[in-house]
C-alpha cells in the first residue's frame, strides 16, 4: 500500500537523483548520470514525472545540433518509460555571468541575457509538456547592501516577470509561473526570502492571476519558520501552484534531506494538510541522497521520499478516523450557535448585539483545552502504537 502510483503525482528533478554527491568542501562521489539514465532510474523506482532546469538537460554551451539530439533522446526516454514533465525552470545561478544576480543584476546586459535565456528555457519546457514554470532567484540578492538599492532590485524583478508573462501570453502557452522563496544561500541575503514575501510581491505584478508560489520545506526551515503555515497561506490565497518536499533541520544550511528524514511531526502535518484540502498538484521531491550513497542507495533515497509520504498519508487518514482524537477536537471546537450572528460579517445590528453581550471572562478561561493529550495521541499514532 506504500508503493507509488501515477495518481500520487510524485516527481523528482534531474538535479536531485542525478546529484553526483559533490558539495562546497568535496568532489563528487558518484559518476554523473545522463538525463536519459535519470529518467530510467526514476521509472524504476515508480516516480510519475521528472522536472528539470534548462541546463540539467541541455548544457549551457551546447550547439543547436547537440541541443536537438539531447532533446530527442530525452523525449524517447520519456516515451519508453511513460514519465511526464509537469514542471521546468531556468538555471540563473550557476554560471559566472550571474555572479551579481540575473533579473536584479546591476548590469543591464546581464538582465537582458537572463530574459533571453529564460524565454528559450520556457520554450523547451513547454515543448516537453510543462504546465508550471518555477522561478528560484538563487543569486537575486546581496552580500553588501551598498551594492544594490532594494527598490531598484524589486522593480527589475517585477519588470522581468511582467515581460515573461507577456511572452507566454504572446506565444499562446498554457503555463503558470511559481515563485520560490529562500532566505539565504548562495547569497548572503536573497530578496523576497519567504513564501509570505512572495505572496505580497505577486499582487504588485501585471498578471497576478498567472503567478503563484512554489514553497520548499528546507527554505522555510532555514529561517526557523513553520512550513505548513506557509503552505496554508498559499493555499488560502489560491497560489499553491507547486510544492518542493524535502527535509531540513531548523537554522542550518540548505540540507535537502530525504522527505521525512528529520522532522517527522512537521512532515505529518504537511501531508495531512495537503490531503485534507485536496491538493491536486505534483508532489515534487527537491531533495538529495547522502554524499555517501552509491546509485543503489540513491534509488532507496527516492523510494524513501515517496514511501514516507504515503505512510504519512495513511497516518493522516487514521488521525481523521481516530475516535478519541476526533472527540477531543469536537469538544475543543464546540459551537452552540450563540455567536452565529457574526458569521455574516459586519452590520450595525450585529455590532450592537455584540456590544450588548456581557462576557464572563472566568467562564471563558475555564474551558478545557487538552492540547497536551491531543499532541500525545498524535505522537502515539505516529509511533505506531495507536
Image (tube, rainbow, N blue to C red):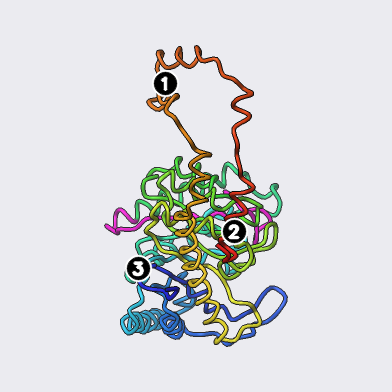
Label 1: element kind: loop
Real-space Cα distance between discs 2 and 1? 38 Å
In the image, 21 versus 150, the foreground residue is 21
Residue 193 visible somewhere in the drawing: no
Label 3: element kind: helix
**Labelled pair 2, 3 in contact (Cβ < 8 Å):** no
Number of residues whose C-alpha sits closer than 10 Å to that of mark 3, classed few (under 14), some (14–19) or many (20 or more)? few
Earlier residue among tags 1 and 3: 3
Q: Name the residue at 56% across, 53% down.
A: 227
180 is within the stretch colored magenta:
yes
Residue 195 visible somewhere in the drawing: yes
Q: Name the residue at 35% across, 62% down.
A: 131
Q: Which mark is residue 265?
A: 2
Number of residues whose C-alpha sits closer than 10 Å to that of mark 1, classed few (under 14), some (14–19) or many (20 or more)? few
Q: Residue furthest left?
A: 172
For disc 3, the marked residue is 7
Front of the two marks 2 and 1: 2
Region in magenta: 168-192
* Residue 184, placed above or below residue 68: above
Q: Which mark is residue 346?
A: 1
Q: Can you say which quadrant of the picture contains the N terminus?
A: bottom left
Q: Name the residue at 40% across, 27% down.
A: 343
Amino acid at each position: 500500500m506504500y508503493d507509488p502510483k501515477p495518481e500520487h503525482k510524485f516527481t523528482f528533478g534531474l538535479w536531485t537523483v542525478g546529484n553526483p554527491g559533490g558539495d562546497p568542501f568535496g568532489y563528487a562521489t558518484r559518476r554523473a548520470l545522463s538525463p536519459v539514465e535519470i529518467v530510467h532510474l526514476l521509472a524504476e523506482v515508480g516516480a510519475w514525472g521528472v522536472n528539470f532546469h534548462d541546463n540539467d538537460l541541455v548544457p549551457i554551451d551546447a550547439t543547436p545540433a547537440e541541443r536537438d539530439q539531447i532533446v530527442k533522446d530525452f523525449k524517447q526516454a520519456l516515451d519508453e518509460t511513460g514519465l511526464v514533465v509537469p514542471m521546468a525552470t531556468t538555471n540563473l545561478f550557476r554560471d559566472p555571468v550571474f555572479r551579481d544576480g540575473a533579473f536584479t543584476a546591476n548590469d543591464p546586459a546581464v538582465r537582458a541575457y537572463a530574459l533571453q535565456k529564460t524565454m528559450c528555457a520556457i520554450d523547451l519546457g513547454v515543448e516537453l509538456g510543462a504546465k508550471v514554470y518555477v522561478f528560484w532567484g538563487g543569486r537575486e540578492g546581496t552580500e553588501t547592501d551598498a551594492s544594490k538599492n532594494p527598490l531598484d532590485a524589486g522593480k527589475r524583478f517585477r519588470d522581468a516577470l511582467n515581460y515573461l508573462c507577456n511572452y507566454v501570453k504572446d506565444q499562446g502557452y498554457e503555463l503558470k509561473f511559481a515563485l520560490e522563496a529562500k532566505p539565504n544561500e548562495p547569497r548572503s541575503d536573497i530578496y523576497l526570502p519567504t513564501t509570505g514575501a512572495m505572496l505580497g510581491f505577486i499582487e504588485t505584478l501585471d498578471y497576478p492571476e498567472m503567478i503563484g508560489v512554489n514553497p520548499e520545506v528546507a527554505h522555510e526551515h532555514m529561517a526557523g519558520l513553520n512550513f505548513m503555515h506557509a503552505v496554508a497561506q498559499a493555499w488560502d490565497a489560491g497560489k499553491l501552484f507547486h510544492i518542493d518536499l524535502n527535509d531540513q533541520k531548523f537554522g542550518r544550511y540548505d540540507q535537502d534531506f530525504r522527505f521525512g528524514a528529520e522532522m517527522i511531526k512537521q512532515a505529518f502535518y504537511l501531508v495531512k494538510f495537503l490531503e485534507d484540502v485536496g491538493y491536486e498538484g505534483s508532489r515534487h521531491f527537491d531533495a538529495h541522497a547522502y554524499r555517501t550513497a552509491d546509485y543503489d542507495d540513491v534509488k532507496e533515497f527516492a523510494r524513501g521520499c515517496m514511501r514516507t509520504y504515503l505512510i504519512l498519508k495513511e497516518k493522516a487518514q487514521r488521525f481523521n478516523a481516530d475516535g478519541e482524537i476526533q472527540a477531543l477536537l469536537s469538544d475543543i471546537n464546540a459551537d452552540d450557535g450563540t455567536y452565529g450572528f457574526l458569521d455574516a460579517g459586519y452590520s450595525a445590528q450585529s455590532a450592537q448585539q455584540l456590544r450588548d453581550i456581557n462576557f464572563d471572562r472566568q467562564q471563558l478561561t475555564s474551558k478545557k483545552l487538552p492540547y497536551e493529550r491531543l499532541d500525545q495521541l498524535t505522537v502515539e499514532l505516529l509511533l505506531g502504537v495507536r
